[in-house]
Amino acid sequence: MTTHTAQIIDGNALSRQLREAVAARCLSLKVKGVIPGLAVVLVGENPASQVYVRNKVKACSDAGLHSVLEKYDASMTEAELLMRIDALNNDPAIHGILVQLPLPPHIDANKVIEAIAPSKDVDGFHVASAGALMVGQPGFWPCTPYGCMKMLESIGYDLRGKHAVVIGRSNIVGKPMALMLLQKNATVTVCHSATVNLKAMTLQADVIVAAVGKRNVLTADMVKPGAVVLDVGMNRNDEGKLCGDVDFAGVSQVAGYITPVPGGVGPMTITMLLVNTLEAAERAAKKP
């Protein structure tokens, strides 16, 4: 058997293309007097969250979107936060609202997400957005799995009749990922911590999405030659370097396509946030 050396799906390059398209669509909205606006709300001092929020705000301004960063002390009450969201829901200059998770423990994240108007839920976490994805109606798709779909599209991959295995069942990645793959006529298996023989499942897969947040969940012996592997994980290895859920060195010798970490799915997540915010603005502009 000859060893494949997988083709890399470059999330940075694809992001640049998509962000250029966003910038162009932004301009055509500006001509109509609409500037797409995103409000990013950060409560507390979580250092990782601060980095994510900075990147999101920077990506917005680079693409010509208007963004507002609201930072609050960890002592902010749930009631105060809900009042802020209500004000943003009613602000016509804001088309998308993103509350950076995790929130301080005294604030119920579900309650906060459900308070965001579904028309401004650019993270795609609201129950109404999840329902729209479930039944195939227009809504907002969660950014990470949406980015994964764009990566498959970028390599011209036809999912019809293919077997896709999703490792992970979170509401943010695993479950919506499975529904998006299903929408494209893939046969989908969702695996998770209670799956008995993960390797037996992944060896059948034409496409594998690893999204559990655990290093080396997928190794070379678990992948069929030529499969497409999308690595959603963000972990650190023993040297403190960023790595994914997939053993990249090994799997890239077997897979047909693979996404790297960093520079794979990560940049796509922020890109799809821009796409969702732009779509929210376009929908709002169409409303009489």
Image (cartoon, rainbow, N blue to C red):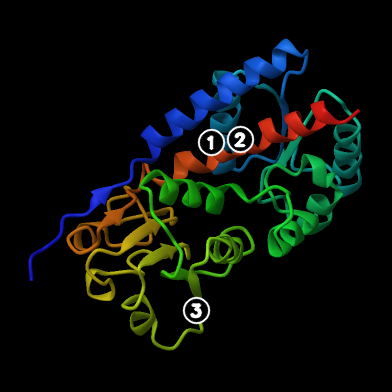
Residue 208 x %, y %:
39, 66
For image coordinates 78% across by 13% down, the residue present is 33
Q: Are marks 1 and 2 in contact (CB under 8 Å)?
A: yes
60 versus 73 height, above or below = above
Residue 250 x %, y %:
20, 63
Residue 216 appears in the figure: yes
Residue 41 x %, y %:
73, 36
Q: Are marks 3 and 1 in contact (CB under 8 Å)?
A: no
Q: Which residue is mark 3?
A: 193
Residue 185 x %, y %:
52, 66
Residue 72 appears in the figure: no
Q: Which residue is mark 2?
A: 275
Between 61 and 256, the one nearer to me in the picture: 256
- Badge 1 marks a residue whose secondary structure is helix
For image coordinates 59% across by 47% down, the residue present is 143
Q: Earlier in the sequence, mark 3 or mark 1?
A: 3
Task: State left or right for residue 56 relative to residue 230.
Answer: right
- Give the numbered dot on residue 271: 1
For image coordinates 78% across by 59% down, the residue present is 127
Label 1, label 2: how far apart the Cα atoms are: 6 Å
- Give the numbered dot on residue 286: none
- Badge 2 marks a residue whose secondary structure is helix
